[in-house]
Image (spheres, helix red, strand yellow):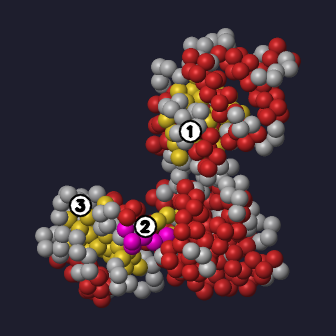
Amino acid sequence: MEKFVDRTKELETLEKEFCREESSFVVVYGRRRVGKTALINHFCKGKNAIYFLATEEGENENRENFKNIVGNHFDNTLLLNASVNRWEDIFSVVQNRENPSERLILVIDEFQYLGKANKSFPSVMMGIWDKILCKSNVMLILCGSLINMMTSQVLNYDSPLYGRRTAQIKLKQIAFKYYHEFDESYSEEQQIERFAVTGGVPKYVELFESDTDIYEAIRKNVLSRNAFLYAEPEFLLQKEVSEIGSYFSILKVIAGGQHKLGKIATALNQPQTSLSKYLSVLTDLDLLERQVPITEENPEKSKMGLYFIKDNFIKFWFQFVYPYRSLLEADRDEFVISKIKQSFIENHVSYVYEDICREKIWDFLGDKCTFNRVGRWWGNRDIEIDIVAYDSVGTDILFGECKYSKNPKGMDVLEALKEKANSVTWNKEFRKEYFCIFSKNGFSPALEEYAKQHENIILASLKMPHENC
């Protein structure tokens, strides 16, 4: 059973919609396994609710199933025994229920399958909402896990349902700062390494709970041919896109370290213009993101854009599973695990640690330094800075370095960071600079003493930030 973690803002949105005086229409969507159904079920506890899960069966089968669920909910024998050919007849039973003053939640999960079975179903649903449900003291929740279909059927301007919704929730993965709530027994290091594989997908986290050793958990849940996650990226993409091979090729190249559009195109032997559609779809699916140096004033027009895999599990799978599929099919799990152990920390976990630190930097904001933008920075001379945070309407700027390694970090790390900071031209003559170093295994006595004497130096682990800022 998945443990319910976080989702405070999403629950606040749902409660607000539930308390509206008129009917409400909420769209909940997001990738598979991210916890949409768990969120809705948690919200519906103790409330008058009807839950219907649409399937990939035909429209008639779905309508019959929905009829039976509604009939049983209202103990309506007439509806249960009726032969119904119109969806409107079932929703009319909802409208004409015995106690219309009591708020009713009506959930249609995997809504996109109804539109897939009948392309005109969004128009049917529009008529049902306009003529029946909007006047029936109902909270309608349409939920779906195929993002492209939910967008086209419900959210896009050209959808018949456009403009009807009163709220929408695109459910994201759980942030790392809540990850410990899944299992408080794991150390911070264990949490980081697990998060590097599972991301914040509750179902994935649940699968990893039974093994304390991260590599054994990977072997059992990802590398085994019968494992739940062995072919998960294929399942995620096959219903969203038609040319899965093209998308896999792009993800493989990016996972292999090519982030510039030109280099991605060269590696695939394709013109850059032919990749735009694929990159856009992967971005819409929350699997990919285009980043620019955080100080860029016009991100969309920037020529410094780089593409990164956004999803930790997808990134891990394309780095460590996809290249070894032939070996895994031959049951060479142990060999693949040995290869993973050689580079898992340095080539994967350390980069996820940077993401965690960028998320955590917001907790360091205080009276002495204020920021409203946080991200990565890189220049034309292969200079990269893990964290740059600044106040776009002020003068404060922070430069950060993230070190996920065994040894305490010393003054050399700080001096190197200061040198790289000179390459950032933003407000250079008037800014007030701060420097932050995240280190998995602490700091040298010399660096700690230096930080005590300089208020603009911040030394931080994820749990114990220095109190300078």
Q: Are marks 3 and 2 in contact (CB under 8 Å)?
A: no
Q: Are marks 1 and 2 in contact (CB under 8 Å)?
A: no
Q: Which label sits in the foreground, 3 or 2?
A: 2
Q: Is residue 60 something one can see in this rendering?
A: yes
**x then y, percent, for residue 149:** 64, 46
**Magenta residues (range):** 302-307
- Residue at the image position 83 percent from the left and 80 percent from the top: 330
Q: Amino acid at mark 1?
A: Asp
Q: Earlier in the sequence, mark 3 or mark 2?
A: 2
Cα distance in 3D space between marks 1 and 2: 30 Å
Q: Which residue is mark 1?
A: 158
**x then y, percent, for residue 301:** 37, 64
Q: Which label sits in the foreground, 3 or 1?
A: 1
Cα distance in 3D space between marks 3 and 1: 39 Å
Q: Secondary structure at mark 1?
A: loop
The image quarter containing residue 155 is: top right
- Residue at the image position 48 percent from the left and 60 percent from the top: 176
The image quarter containing residue 338 is: bottom right
Q: Amino acid at mark 3?
A: Asp
Q: Amino acid at mark 2?
A: Gln
**x then y, percent, for residue 469:** 23, 65
Q: Secondary structure at mark 2?
A: strand
